[in-house]
Image: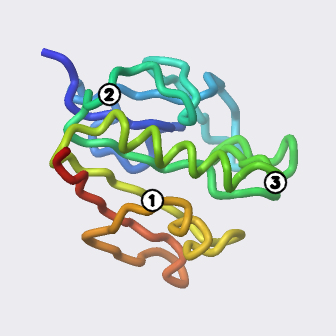
Amino acid sequence: MEQPILDMCCGSRMFWLDKRDERAVFTDIRREQHTLCDGRNLHINPDIIADFRALPFPDNSFAQVVFDPPHLDRAGENGWMRKKYGALNKDTWRDDLRAGFAEAFRVLRPHGTLIFKWNETQIPVSQVIALTDQKPTVWQRTGKGDKTHWIIFLKEAG
């Protein structure tokens, strides 16, 4: 059985209930290990090294896609925030996220679900959601100060 779920930028799989869920393919652009400032170990160990802007999968491959890209465009080169969450290129983040949305919908099957997560600590979610012409079905704000957004999309048929 091929996995029905794709996590496009899995990082350390922080929000997964089962970090080894066999239903999912975990991809990320990096494979790293770090010790954070509080002594915890951080492991970024994707199944496949892949850039979310150019995924190595055929069209319509997954029933569910999780897209939790880096949300920081300002993070110190050796800072724990960059290590934990990754960082966007401050000059190209709009084009990068636009390409990420396009890839998410390309590899998503018709009637499949895209789960998009964004924290607007540095970049407002309104600027990010404007990078796709797809219409969300569910939008929930959570976290400290309601800065984390969980946005669900359903891919239309055809």
Q: Residue furthest right?
A: 77
Which residue matches tag 1? 117
| Disc 3 versus disc 2: nearer the observer | 2
Which residue is at a point 26% across and 31% down the rendered structure image? 60
Q: Residue at x 63, y 75 (%)?
A: 124
Disc marking residue 59? 2
Q: Amino acid at mark 1?
A: Lys
Residue type at mark 2: give it.
Answer: Asp
Give residue 49's position: percent from left, percent from top: 54, 19
The residue lying at 34 percent from left, 74 percent from top is: 139
Q: Which is nearer the N-term, disc 2 or disc 1? A: 2
**Alpha carbons under labels 2 and 1: distance apart:** 22 Å
Instruction: Determine the residue located farthest toward the left in the rendered image.
Output: 1
Who is closer to the viewer here, 86 or 90? 90
For residue 132, above or below residue 87: below
Give the x, y percent position of residue 2. Answer: 19, 18
| Horizontal and vertical percent position of residue 72 | 71, 57
Judging from the image, what secondary structure is the residue with disc 3 in?
Answer: loop
Instruction: State which mark lies toward you, 2 or 1.
Output: 2
Q: Which residue is disc 3 drawn over?
A: 90
Judging from the image, what secondary structure is the residue with disc 2 in? loop
Taking depth in this image into account, of 4 and 79 the one nearest to the observer is 4
Up/down of 49 relative to 34, above or below: above
Residue at mark 1 to residue at mark 3: CA–CA distance: 19 Å
Query: Image quarter for residue 104?
Result: top left
Residue type at mark 3 is: Lys
Position of 33 with respect to 151 (left or right) is right
128 and 35: which is toward the camera: 128
Give the structural element (helix, strand or loop) at label 1: strand
Instruction: For residue 137, say whether it is visible.
Output: yes
Pointer 3: residues within 10 angstroms few (<14), some, or many (20+)?
Answer: few
Please give left or right for residue 67 compared with residue 100 in the image: left
